Amino acid sequence: MVRKMANIFGVVLLVVGVLGFIPGITTGSMNDGMLLGLFHVNILHDVIHILSGVLALAAGMSSAKASKMYFMVFGVIYALVAILGFINVDKDILGVVASNVWDTWLHVVIAVLALYFGFAAKDEEEMPVAA
């Protein structure tokens, strides 16, 4: 299940990252746009989503252990990004990654899911086989 979720995360993050570059889906400029009219994005934000997606897919295709490690690391990263989003409401995170309240709450959801799959979820490869 952890590998499957890493692959799902990977596809979703890749799609979201690519959508950030498509006019009409993202309004405004590429360096200061609104994805789906809700999420504040810029080029760096979109590239981070694409890279996160590529790493998730690589982990998901590799092993359950790699997938759990991906979720552990990215769960912590997205939790920190969410905290920074709450500290700097409607301001760019660290002055470079576009963010607004919608982004912050989405990062909270991503962090919670990633931390669950990284630390709490059991994968089929880890479960004992019943006799």
Image: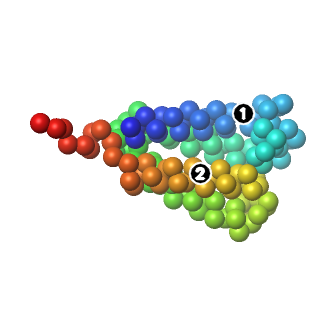
Above-or-below relation of 105 to 39 = below
Residue occupying the point 83% across, 47% down: 32
Q: Quadrant of the N terminus?
A: top left
The residue lying at 18 percent from left, 38 percent from top is 129
Q: Residue at x 66, y 42 (%)?
A: 47
Residue labelled with disc 2:
109
Outermost residue, front side: 131
**Label annotation for residue 10:** none
Residue 31 left/right relative to 108: right
In the structure shown, which secondary structural element does the residue marked by tag 2 occupy? helix
Q: What is the distance, in whole Å, between disc 1 and disc 2 at their CAs? A: 20 Å
Q: Which residue is disc 1 drawn over? A: 19
Question: Is 46 placed above or below 103 here?
Answer: above
Quarter location, residue 90: bottom right
Amino acid type assigned to the residue bearing label 1 in the image: Leu
Q: Residues within 10 Å of mark 2 (few under 14, many from 20)?
A: some
Q: Please state the horizontal and vertical placement of residue 98, each as a whole percent of the image.
A: 76, 53
Q: In the rendered image of this protein, does residue 118 appear above or below residue 93?
A: above
Tag 1 secondary structure: helix
